[in-house]
Image: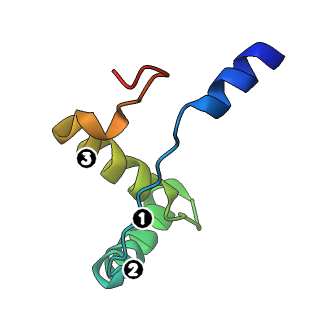
Amino acid sequence: MVKSMTAALKIPHFNLMEEISMDNLVKARQNILSDVEKKYGVGKISYLPFMIKASSLALKEYPEINAYVNEDCT
């Protein structure tokens, strides 16, 4: 475990941050909440399912986002 953790420290890590407007998602979630509560008896839906769907669609269209760099940078 120590070997793999030490090796992981040698590989550069990258972060991507974007600022987006969530206004339309907030409205869409509010519209969905009442329908879901009536149909399934669920009174709460977080933003997580929306983020997972958006991430999966983005990764499908741009698979290089899920790339990695090894110690040799190849």
The amino acid type found where label 3 is placed reads: Ala
Q: Nearer the viewer, mark 3 or mark 1?
A: 1
Indicate the position of residue 1 as horizontal and vertical percent values.
Answer: 81, 15
- Which residue is painted at 52% across and 39% down in the image? 12
For marks 3 and 1, the one nearer the N-term is 1
For marks 3 and 2, give the CA distance: 20 Å
- Which residue is painted at 46% across and 65% down in the image? 38
**Side of 6 where 62 appears, left or right:** left
Q: Nearer the viewer, residue 48 or 21?
A: 21
The amino acid type found where label 2 is placed reads: Val
Picture disc at residue 58: 3
For marks 3 and 2, the one nearer the N-term is 2
Is residue 46 shown to the viewer in this render? yes
**Side of 71 where 31 appears, left or right:** left
For marks 2 and 1, the one nearer the N-term is 1
- Which residue is painted at 45% across and 71% down in the image? 33
Q: Nearer the viewer, mark 2 or mark 1?
A: 1
Q: Nearer the viewer, residue 12 or 58?
A: 12
**Side of 5 where 26 appears, left or right:** left
Q: Is residue 44 above or below residue 8?
A: below
Residue topped by disc 1: 17
Circle 3 — which element? helix
